[in-house]
Image (spheres, coloured by chain):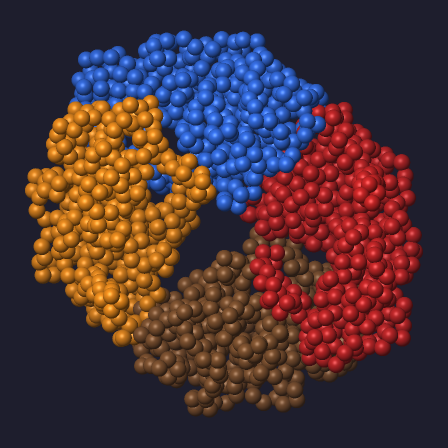
Chain colours: A blue, B orange, C brown, D red
């Protein structure tokens, strides 16, 4: 996941980036950072935690400059440690350079070994540092070095790179992750989602295209497509869960797409008898509304979400944990009592949370619980930046839908069919999406993973 | 506002109180505290901030004991300072005593002056300390001293009082604030709302009645009604805004009551033409759903609420503040574009927030904005514990509905009529509510306030 | 112990008090606080820890005003908790009043019980709060109420009391603790020691006399002696250990007095053969220099004190603790090797520290260790504000000098004789000092203590 | 400056290193860190501040392992930032490696440029990272790579390098900084000073020789001298000021050496008439005692040092700063009044501090102030790790002794002659010391500095 934002040609570049990170905070809560360019130097402020925790007034004021890039991190590779927080800032023969990257390299391990053999020193565990090392070894000018480096990496993601005199943006040729360009009174804004442009009241210019490299320098934007073309495989999970409802993703509004997914789900489950449609808030709300539209079953906020259970919450003792299972999502007894409930969620990963929620509805008096999920069963892990767990923990990787239904203890379980999902996501056109997590068919080679898989298999064989 | 919880006869009293405070956190975020009784002593842990911020694991573990009371504070009287955080713990001739109180004394200033003349020393600015001083000067036993003290105070609110050997609860004779009794495997639970009982999986026993004093001692609950009877004037704002949707308040579920208020609002505004009903989240959601039910106009989450704008947020510079007005509530452009919008909110106080939201909808493309509010205009300040501002700042105290509509720049403005509101709140029966904020008719004398008002008037006369 | 400072008639009152507390920090490191008077109000800033930890720039700047009092606390009565930190600020019928007090009331328990019976509420465990309660119950004017209150208390100590329009200082009739008056360009300064006057470059005016009450109001100083006269019993431990070497205490410079004590010790132990005189730094340095003067034995800093072992230091595991006994005081091997050492310290309380130091000298190669102590054996606890432990822990309360010598494993042990000590302390005149800790003869009744002692004795009898 | 410690072959390696850092804390207070080797991995804990601030109990307990290295940093190169805190930990083709280094590379800038041209990425500003990059580019085994790297660097300092299976120590061929080897029950200890060995009760084995590389692996110590021999130029300032009095430095006890410097100073100034010798504490105490020995003038602690003025101290306003100049060093008025004072300090750098101290003595009543300094005038900056300022700020670089005396406003000023200093430092033999700061003759080329100097000169010529 992770969110990135870049600002160029504004006297308040870091301040705008700071606000932009608030609009992208849902993409990563582990760390936050901004690097600003000022008089030939780059100044960083990076820390663990939320944007509001990392940036004090003093920290923000120290970041003067006319351009800046920012990052919020949701740990995928690399442990949770400030060394892994981005943007990464380093000094090379190209001068100081800062990089903010979201996504995953699928050949990271191989590149890392090769770089270490050639004398590279690593201080973090991130893929981003690999890109930095490649860059440091390519001859200038910087733009060419960036392109030469990106030619060597495989995988997903978007990149923002800040030098004292320019801002470079790149989106991978497959188009896994979104990246948009905006404009605000002469300033240029690059961001993972349009939520950042909206907040800043910037004009939405366009999506950065897959494989496009954009350079903002001297108040001008130039664009190239220097990589060989690749099939379009946009991440549909961005629309299902990841992005904010008010964002445009791949050119479509997320809230509208989700409502349509809910309608498709109702069409697919036509005939299901129920009294109330209840979403798992907040991500299931739009799909539940769509389901209600199409089925005519009334919508209710039958689960109330508490915003006070923070990360620093002290878990109650084991005994009380049972008692207090509903700290985060409290069922509304009077709304559920005696009702047949359609419970709408965006996805099921491990299944344990869904199981607890279904149980909680039943305890609050629901007569029947029918689970409706706005995407197909997730059977394979993501290698392109989404933090899904390994196969062993994906409930649908090892269990049939009937088995999952029994595990959840629900009266019925319906997953949205892939074709319906893609049609909703693409506004009628199902082409151009990555479906690896639902099908196990990865659109790119994944050498690091295959190697590990082989090693594991070998061990098992030896053991067996 | 403020929330209180008391636990008796449980080996995990403080742990249960801690969880209970999470379920009452919406009633106060300024400070939190628990006092637990253990072997004849009372041990406090009190601090500024959210429950999750105040209680570390160590702090919680230090609070062993079989009974405990907890408090979350929303500052009404007394400045924001840890000295004012509750429960207050003090030592008197009755031994150590802790008090948690929500509500407001209307004769506080008079009592305070009188106590100081008799040698009392004050260390906080709270009404609660006044009750403590009265208590310390009454002869025992403790239960009688509590009743004798409460006879001297006027105003609203509920009280929990913890001594090493008993837990005493009292609700004022008017019944302004709610207080419920629950039971969990032999333990007794007293709480401002049933959300705390639900979270703990406790059985709801009943409301504590107006003017009732309950004593839990030696595993038994006894009850008295020692005060002269008073007219029933329950605070309807509890149901409109204050309480959690999953709570029972005055015997009715808040979510259902709010949905009915929305339906009444639609009935009242019958004929209003619009394309979409949009709530101000989270408090306007149920009323908006009710409005949509009755009017047939589709419901949409046209405003997305961000949960990352905390109290420690660094406000952007004046210039950027304009730009970033939507940090907390972001309009969904695609949902609003070209639409006639009914914007549903629970109340209008100063009017500035509503004005900004309406503006933001319009900027996002809404063709018309019709504001619908689920209570009447607020024309008078509350003296019973709700933190409404003084007359000067209440927009409806000085302006007609037509003027307010112009200020908000909305195409129409409808407030729910008082009769309709009370009918929804009372499940058909409009009697037994305080309507002072809508009518200016206070159900009790308010001597402190009247004195101040007289002084102010006198000054004006002298000046004029 | 504790240190107090008061400033009147200066536009920078709190800033001067803040500096003054630095010069008194050695008298108490547990908490620090200042209250400043400004336009009829008193504003406090009080916290746990060192002056440098408690006062941020913002905190200090908030303390505008023309008069202020400050306090550093060394816990004697009352547990270590911010509620016990001083100055205490409270509101009475006399208006707001702040009190800073150093010393101990010997009838505190009795007064407290009586006040509680009359309805007083206690929020701290300090003697100071007792004085506040007495004060609140006496009729005004304030000065008379202060005197009437002090007539009821017994024990030691000095008091500074700040009201919006005056600063009142009082020293107990026995003169246990020092208090001096200074003047700086029209401002008046009251402080425990002249070190505060010196730091502020203030002119030393005079000692406040035992039993004197000084009122600074309207730029004038007035003085009274309203209490019955008492025998003069100044605390000689102030000069031996407590005060800073650069202070005048009871009219004599502490460094000079200590050097003279060292000379007396050398005279008393005439004939002792040794190669080097080594102090326990820092408090033993002056006496060791005096010993060297008189005996002709060379002085050396054979123990080096580390300033980096703070209160937050993580103690090593038991095993390493043995190894690392010298974290705070490291012996200089080359200076001690093969030498006969006279080790000079100011006093021996429990004996464990002295034992460890002697051992450490020996391990570093000292051939003989002769301990010389600049006061007599401490046989009785102090009830006048010095934090000596109870009899059971005072090594000299239960053991002869010969036994202590064996316990310390030293080659000889000499305590300065009482007569010699008092002569040094009094500049030749041994009269007018409290010698309770050396003789067990207390100059005042100590009712609280005697009652406790009786109870304990009773229990023992019953048990035996 | 900086201090380093290494422990090998102890189950409590990190705990011993932690204690060792306390005994070296005087060498650096900016940051502290330890890296421990455990089962093939290296684990760091590094932070800004004192050892007692950086290490919590939890942090220390996480550092299990049989070997460890630690570092305390006094910033010389590299700004004050946690990225520059040591030990540095990085991953290379040799596996994980941690380095702790004290000293300065004189060809750092040149090496850095060359490494950047070859693709190196820098994340800190330290010389230590340069060594790491060199190391990563040399073929293994590790020991050979270390030696090959050190052949490329010029300058001063000692190095400790930790790998999962070995601990390597190196001292530069000139022997600028000290490094000693100790032994404790089978464990090996390497440390900057013997104070660390003494604290741990370890046996002092020997100094590591200039140019020696020691490898501890598999419980055995091996030694090589792989570098071409260089002239011996030990830093005499270690003995004058830097090291702890209880340490052996270059085989001599620091306290004894300093006392001898004081004696030499008295011999040199024979005939000086004075009443009292007063040191600037703590570093001037030993020399002042030596001066007193030789001259017969009595020694007194005429200045009292306060230990409560920490780094976080809030400086008083400009006006009060004048008043409160003596926060750190308070003169003892009664000791100084009317006296002719010899003020002994270890060195004069900028002269401002000495000037203030002299003034403060005079204000306290001193009749004459004669300044005696236990080293010659410092005329040139140090390029070998001591944080002396640039020429412009060294008072003796631009002023004669007569001028300095006038600036200090003292009655006489005597610097210890170089020959006398070296004789005292060398126990009679003045050879083998670096005297660059007193003579401007640097024992090694200093290319970085010369290049900068040339550039500056060029600019001036162009400007002129």
> D8 or C133, which lies in front?
C133
D398 sits to left or right of A56: right
- Residue B35: image quadrant is bottom left
> C342 or C1, which lies in front?
C1
**Residue C190 % position (x, y):** 52, 77
**Residue C429 % position (x, y):** 63, 90
**Residue B301 % position (x, y):** 29, 28
- Residue at position x 83%, y 33% from top? D151
A297 sits to left or right of C447: left
Q: Is residue C71 visible?
A: no
User: Compared to B253, does B396 lie above or below?
Assistant: below
- Residue A401: image quadrant is top left
- Residue at position x 8%, y 46% from top? B431
**Residue D164 % position (x, y):** 67, 33
Q: Residue furthest front?
A: B464
User: Compared to B376, does B385 lie above or below?
Assistant: below
A335 sits to left or right of D233: left
- Residue at position x 69%, y 42% from top? D78
Q: Is residue A47 visible?
A: yes
- Residue at position x 22%, y 21% from top? A292
Q: How many marks?
A: 0
> B408 or D424, which lies in front?
B408
């Amino acid at each position: 996941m992770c969110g990135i934002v870049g600002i160029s040609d504004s006297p308040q570049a870091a301040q705008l980036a700071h606000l932009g990170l608030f609009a992208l905070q849902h993409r990563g809560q582990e760390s936050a950072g901004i690097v600003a360019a000022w008089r030939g130097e780059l100044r960083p402020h990076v820390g663990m935690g939320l944007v509001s925790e990392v940036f004090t007034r003093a920290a923000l004021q120290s970041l003067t400059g006319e351009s800046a890039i920012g990052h919020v991190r949701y740990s995928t590779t690399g442990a949770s440690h400030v060394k892994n927080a981005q943007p990464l800032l380093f000094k090379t023969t190209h001068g100081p350079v800062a990089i903010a990257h979201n996504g995953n390299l699928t050949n990271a391990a191989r590149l890392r070994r090769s770089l270490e053999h050639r004398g590279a020193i690593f201080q973090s565990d991130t893929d981003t540092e690999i890109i930095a090392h490649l860059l440091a070894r390519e001859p200038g000018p910087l733009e060419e070095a960036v392109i030469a480096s990106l030619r060597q990496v495989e995988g997903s993601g978007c990149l923002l790179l800040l030098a004292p005199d320019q801002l470079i943006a790149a989106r991978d040729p497959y188009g896994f992750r979104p990246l948009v360009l905006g404009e605000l009174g002469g300033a240029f804004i690059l961001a993972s989602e349009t939520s950042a442009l909206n907040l800043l009241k910037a004009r939405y210019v366009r999506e950065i295209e897959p494989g496009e490299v954009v350079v903002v320098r001297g108040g001008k934007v130039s664009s190239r497509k220097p990589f060989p073309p690749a099939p379009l495989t946009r991440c549909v999970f961005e629309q299902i869960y990841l992005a904010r409802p008010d964002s445009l993703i791949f050119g479509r509004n997320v809230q509208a797409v989700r409502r349509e997914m809910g309608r498709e789900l109702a069409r697919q489950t036509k005939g299901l008898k129920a009294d109330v449609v209840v979403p798992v808030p907040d991500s299931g709300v739009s799909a539940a509304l769509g389901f209600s539209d199409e089925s005519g079953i009334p919508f209710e906020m039958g689960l109330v979400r508490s915003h006070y259970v923070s990360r620093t919450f002290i878990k109650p003792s084991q005994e009380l944990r049972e008692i207090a299972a509903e700290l985060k999502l409290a069922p509304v007894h009077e709304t559920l009592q005696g009702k047949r409930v359609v419970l709408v969620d965006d996805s099921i990963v491990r299944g344990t949370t869904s199981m607890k929620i279904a149980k909680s509805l039943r305890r609050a008096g629901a007569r029947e619980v029918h689970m409706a999920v706005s995407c197909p069963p997730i059977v394979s892990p993501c290698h392109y930046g989404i933090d899904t767990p390994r196969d062993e923990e994906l409930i649908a990787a090892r269990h049939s839908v009937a088995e999952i239904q029994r595990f959840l203890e629900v009266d019925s379980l319906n997953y949205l069919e892939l074709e319906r999902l893609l049609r909703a996501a693409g506004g009628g056109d199902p082409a151009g999406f990555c479906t690896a997590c639902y099908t196990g068919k990865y659109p790119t080679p994944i050498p690091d993973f295959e190697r590990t898989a082989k090693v594991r298999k070998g061990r098992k064989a030896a053991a067996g």
